[in-house]
Image: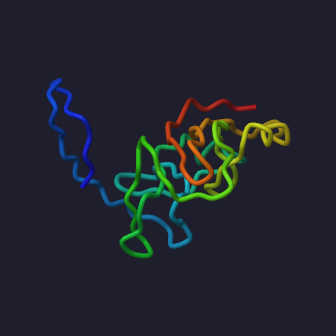
Amino acid sequence: MLLVPSSAGGSGSQVISPTVFTVPSAVALGDLVYLTGTDSADRADNTALSTTPVRGLVLSKPTSTTAILLYYGEIGLFSGLTPGALQFLGTAGGLIEAGGLASLVDGNVIQRAGEAVNSTTLLFAPGDVTLL
């Protein structure tokens, strides 16, 4: 279960039951995913507009073909992030830092995925999609 602050302004929290999504077995923890249908998702990729927008980040994989997604928030599944650096959708569900955007070509997609809190933690907050 996920806990989020109460929208009623009190000090309590609301419990949100996570949705289990069907995914290909190649989808891994930390992958950025787009929705392919009702309760199904696959890896997003900045080389194909059809695999965007990013709608979630794989938080856990209960089985090889199911995943629970994070829609927004901090997740510590990474290594080598530069603290404070903006992170963007890369290829095959991965991340690239802003410096990597220079290698993109016409037809590629730019979508902010979030910001590195430290070397292992991403504040996942997906942005709008821009087609080059």
* Residue drawn where x is 66% and y is 50% of the image: 81
Extreme residue in the top direction: 9
* Residue drawn where x is 54% and y is 50% of the image: 121
Image quarter (top left, top right, bottom left or bottom right) of the N terminus: bottom left
Residue 77 sits above or below residue 5 on the image:
below
Residue 51, position as x, y percentages in the image: 59, 48
* Residue drawn where x is 69% and y is 53% of the image: 91
Residue 64 sits above or below residue 92 on the image:
below
Q: Which corner quadrant of the image does residue 40 belong to?
A: bottom left
Q: Is residue 108 left or right of residue 114?
A: right
Q: Is residue 51 left or right of residue 55?
A: right
Image quarter (top left, top right, bottom left or bottom right) of the C terminus: top right
Residue 4, position as x, y percentages in the image: 26, 40
Report the number of discs.
Answer: 0
- Judging depth in this view, the residue of 50 and 79 nearest the camera is 79
* Residue drawn where x is 54% and y is 40% of the image: 53
Residue 123, position as x, y percentages in the image: 51, 41
- Judging depth in this view, the residue of 58 and 115 nearest the camera is 115
- Colour scheme: rainbow
Extreme residue in the bottom direction: 64
Q: Which corner quadrant of the image does residue 66 belong to?
A: bottom left
- Judging depth in this view, the residue of 8 and 20 nearest the camera is 8
Q: Which corner quadrant of the image does residue 21 belong to?
A: bottom left
